Image: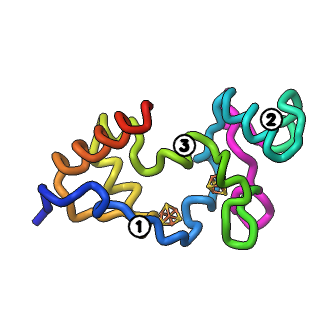
Amino acid sequence: MSLNDIPCDAIFKCIQCGECCNGFGGTFVTPMDIVTIAGYIGADPKTFVRDYCQMSGSRPVIAQGPDGYCIFFRDRLCSIHPVKPRMCRAWPFIDSVLKDPANWRMMAGSCPGMRADVSDACIQRCVREQLATRGS
Ligand code: SF4
Ligand code: SF4
């Protein structure tokens, strides 16, 4: 049975397993992400996409290293944590879950920090609250 009325801070707790930093295609960077991350690592924003990203269709995503992990995942941690991309900061409270809560359960299949035994109503309430808090 799915739970409906549990606090939002109980439906997700990151255990820092690093699974979400593994695999191609997920981590899109916005123009603001590019400027911010480039500044943090001392790179030129103009060449950041060329040197640190791969293209997914027409959009840049952070590149993977040979081990399949994001190139900024080092020593089991995010080396750009204070400026990590909007997508990484927002996870798993993202717009696509608001549109279809089934996405939450799909994401929970690869993220052990997410509880899948909660109701659609609970998921949407919590995502809505988080997005409002973060001004997304
Ligand atoms: S997969 Fe989930 S629990 Fe693991 S590091 Fe990413 S957000 Fe945290
Ligand atoms: S930027 Fe950081 S949090 Fe985001 S995928 Fe890369 S290592 Fe993980």
> Residue 45: horizontal and vertical position, in percent?
83, 31
Circles 2 and 1: CB distance less than 8 Å?
A: no
Q: Which residue is mark 1?
A: 113
The image quadrant where one finds ligand 2 is bottom right
Residue nearest the viewer, comparing 79 with 97: 79
Circles 2 and 3: CB distance less than 8 Å?
A: no
Residue nearest the viewer, comparing 61 with 76: 76
- What number is the disc on residue 49? 2
Instruction: Specify the amino acid type for callout 1.
Output: Gly
* Residue 81 shown left or right of residue 106 in the figure: right
Instruction: Specify the amino acid type for callout 2.
Output: Val
Q: Which residue is mark 3?
A: 87
Residue nearest the viewer, comparing 24 with 29: 29
Instruction: Specify the amino acid type for callout 3.
Output: Met
Q: Which comes before the other along the chain, label 2 or label 3? A: 2
Q: Is residue 134 above or below residue 107?
A: above
Q: Give the quadrant of the N terminus.
A: bottom left
Q: Residues within 10 Å of mark 3 (few under 14, many from 20)?
A: some
Q: Secondary structure at mark 1?
A: loop
Q: Is residue 39 above or below residue 32?
A: below
Q: Which comes before the other along the chain, label 2 or label 1? A: 2
Q: What's the residue at 62%, 39% (across, down)?
A: 28
Cβ(mark 1) to ligand 1 < 8 Å? yes
Cβ(mark 3) to ligand 2 < 8 Å? yes
- Residue 41 among magenta residues: no
* Residue 23 shown left or right of residue 128 in the figure: right
> Residue 34: horizontal and vertical position, in percent?
73, 34
